[in-house]
Amino acid sequence: MQRLLPFALTELLPENVNEALAGIAAFFRDLCTRTVTEEGVQQLQANIPILLCNLEKILPPSFFDVMEHLPVHLPHEASLGGPVQF
């Protein structure tokens, strides 16, 4: 879904909506890779506030509750925990 959804919605949605959804999908794809570097985690940590702001521009305020801020903490948790196998 992280690769298919942005590609499938390219022609259906406006450009700014498509970029926001593709950015969030790329964030989770990069965070869930088998090898996560420290530089990559720092880049994810710098990009996630911008991605969430882009989502706030296109989605109604009722969409955002307590859970939408949690991706901000995920890169830090990944750097603390390291690779985890489920």
Image (cartoon, rainbow, N blue to C red):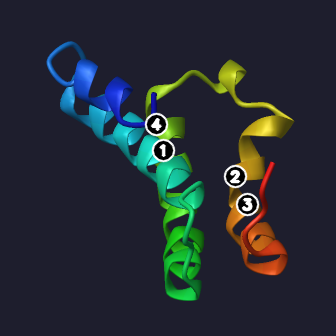
- Placement of 16 over or under 40, stated as above or below: above
Considering the numbered disc 2 on the image, is that residue within a helix, a strand or a loop?
helix
> Which residue was labeled with disc 2?
71
Q: Give me the C-alpha separation between circle 3 and circle 2.
A: 5 Å
Query: Residue at label 3?
Result: 74
Check disc 4 and give the amino acid type. Answer: Lys
Task: List the residue tagged with mark 1.
Answer: 24
- At a point 20% along the width and 32% down the height, the residue shown is 15
Residue 11 occupies which quadrant of the picture?
A: top left
Residue sitting farthest toward the top: 12
Residue hosting label 4: 57
Residue 20, given in percent of the width and then of the height, sits at: 38, 40
The type of residue carrying mark 3 is Leu
Mark 4 lies on a secondary structure that is: helix
When the figure is inspected, residue 50 is found, relative to residue 78, above or below; the finding is above
- At label 2, counting other C-alpha atoms closer than 10 Å, the crowd grade (few under 14, some 14-19, many 20 or more) is some
| Helix, strand or loop under label 3 | helix
- Tag 2: amino acid: Pro
Q: Are marks 2 and 4 in contact (CB under 8 Å)?
A: no
Secondary element type, mark 1: helix
- Name the image quarter holding the N terminus: top left
User: Of marks 2 and 1, which one's residue comes earlier in the chain?
Assistant: 1
